[in-house]
Structure formats: structure tokens, C-alpha cells
Image (cartoon, grey):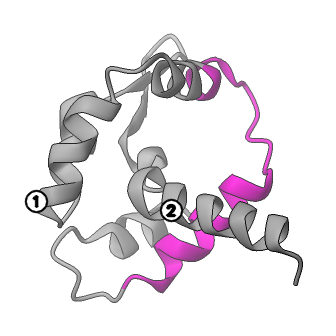
């Protein structure tokens, strides 16, 4: 595998493990608007060091754009990130303290 592919794969995997659970914290209002639950998202990660990283990362323009893009989507377009995030969430054991796998299964 070429070096640039390895680097790309490493970044995708990093972001999947850090923010791939964002979809579990997207609520839909009565008006049909998608709203991101920021604090629940940050606090739900099992790693204290990741929660600390997210505290600062969530203040960046990059993260704001990422979430805004997902809040404004009417349909769920599955790109590489979304596909990998779903694979990651499905791989989390039932015994994981966050219970993400159970939540995911309940979404269908």
C-alpha cells in the first residue's frame, strides 16, 4: 500500500475512533431539524484523555463545520467516514460502558 494511502487510512481511523459516535448524539426536533447534543457527545467517550481532547477540538472551525454539515443534511449520504463510523460502532461490544452498540441496534 502506498505511503499516502497509509497516512489517509490512519487519519480516517483516528477520526472514526474520536468522533465516529457523533450520530448517536444527533436528535431530531418536532420540526424535523437535526440538533447535535454537544456535551453528551463529549462526555460519552470512555477515554478521559479523548474527552479532554474533544473539549478543545469541539471549539475548532473544523469540528463546527463537520457538525453543521450533518445537522443540515436531510438524507443520510454515506461517504467513507460514515461507512467506517458505522463499522466502528457495530464493533463495540455489548458490554462497552457507553452502550453505543445497543443504541445503534435500536435505530434499525
Q: Position of residue 10 (x, y in %)?
A: 62, 68
The front one of 18 and 87 is 18
**Quadrant (top left/top right/bottom left/bottom right) for the N terminus:** bottom right
Outermost residue toward the left?
48
The label on residue 48 is 1
Question: To which quarter of the image does residue 65 belong?
Answer: top right
- Of callouts 2 and 1, the N-terminal one: 2
The front one of 54 and 23 is 54
Q: Residue at x 61, y 29 (%)?
A: 70
Give the residues drawn in magenta, as a range.
69-92
Q: Position of residue 16 (x, y in %)?
A: 53, 60
Q: Residue at x 53, y 24 (%)?
A: 62
Mark 2 falls on what kind of element? helix
Outermost residue toward the top?
31
Q: Position of residue 33 (x, y in %)?
A: 53, 16
Q: Position of residue 52 (x, y in %)?
A: 15, 45
Mark 1 falls on what kind of element? helix
In the rendered view, does 32 fall on the left or right side of 46? right
Q: Residue at x 43, y 45 (%)?
A: 22
Please tell me whether residue 8 belongs to the stretch shown in magenta.
Answer: no
- Determine crowd level at label 1: few under 14, some 14-19, many 20+ residues with C-alpha closer than 10 A: few
In the rendered view, does 104 fall on the left or right side of 8? left
The label on residue 14 is 2
Secondary structure mostly seen in the magenta stretch: helix
Amino acid at each position: 500500500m502506498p505511503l499516502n494511502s497509509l497516512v489517509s487510512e490512519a487519519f480516517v481511523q483516528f477520526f472514526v475512533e474520536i468522533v465516529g459516535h457523533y450520530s448517536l448524539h444527533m436528535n431530531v426536533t418536532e420540526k424535523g431539524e437535526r440538533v447535535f447534543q454537544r456535551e453528551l457527545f463529549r462526555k460519552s467517550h470512555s477515554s478521559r484523555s479523548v474527552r479532554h481532547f474533544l473539549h478543545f477540538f469541539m471549539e475548532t472551525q473544523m469540528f463546527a463545520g463537520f457538525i453543521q454539515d450533518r445537522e443540515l443534511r436531510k438524507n443520510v449520504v454515506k461517504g467513507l467516514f460514515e461507512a467506517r463510523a458505522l463499522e466502528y460502532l457495530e464493533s463495540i461490544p455489548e458490554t462497552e460502558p457507553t452502550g453505543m452498540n445497543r443504541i445503534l441496534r435500536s435505530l434499525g
